[in-house]
Amino acid sequence: MGIELFDEPGLIAGLNLYSSTVGAFNNDTVEAARRFAIQTTHTLCRVMTRKQLTDAMTTSTTIGSATGVVMQRFQLSADRAFEVLTGPRRAD
């Protein structure tokens, strides 16, 4: 039995259950699997969100440190130091 958990651009997840017995999945089993899939989806989404936030905080800290170094080294404002780090801006 396969149950789709989510299908988003670049991210697909499913719950696959197997049995060596033919006809092992009755209506009660299917319903229990669907309920488990819902809880699994919520848990996966929380874990992914937490990882994204942790990654963002790490990136933010690194950018802040680099900006501070450039500010001190070249006596620049925070905005100007960030511009130096990010390079020239292009008009879209």
Image: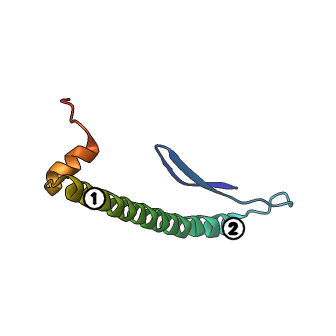
| Residue 84 rendering spot, x and y as whole percentages | 23, 45
Q: Is residue 63 left or right of residue 42?
A: left
Q: Amino acid at mark 1?
A: Val
User: Percent x, y for residue 30?
Assistant: 66, 63
Q: How is the image coloured?
A: rainbow
Which secondary structure, mark 1? helix
Pair 1/2: label in front: 1
Nearest the eye: 37 or 59: 59
The residue closer to the viewer here, 40 or 54, is: 54
Q: Quadrant of residue 27?
A: bottom right
* Sequence order check, earlier mark of 1 and 2: 2
* Element marked by disc 2: helix
Q: CA distance from mark 1 to mark 2?
A: 59 Å
Number of numbered tags placed on the structure image = 2
| Res. 29 mark | 2
On-image quarter of the C terminus: top left
- Asked if residue 74 lies left or right of residue 46, the reply is left
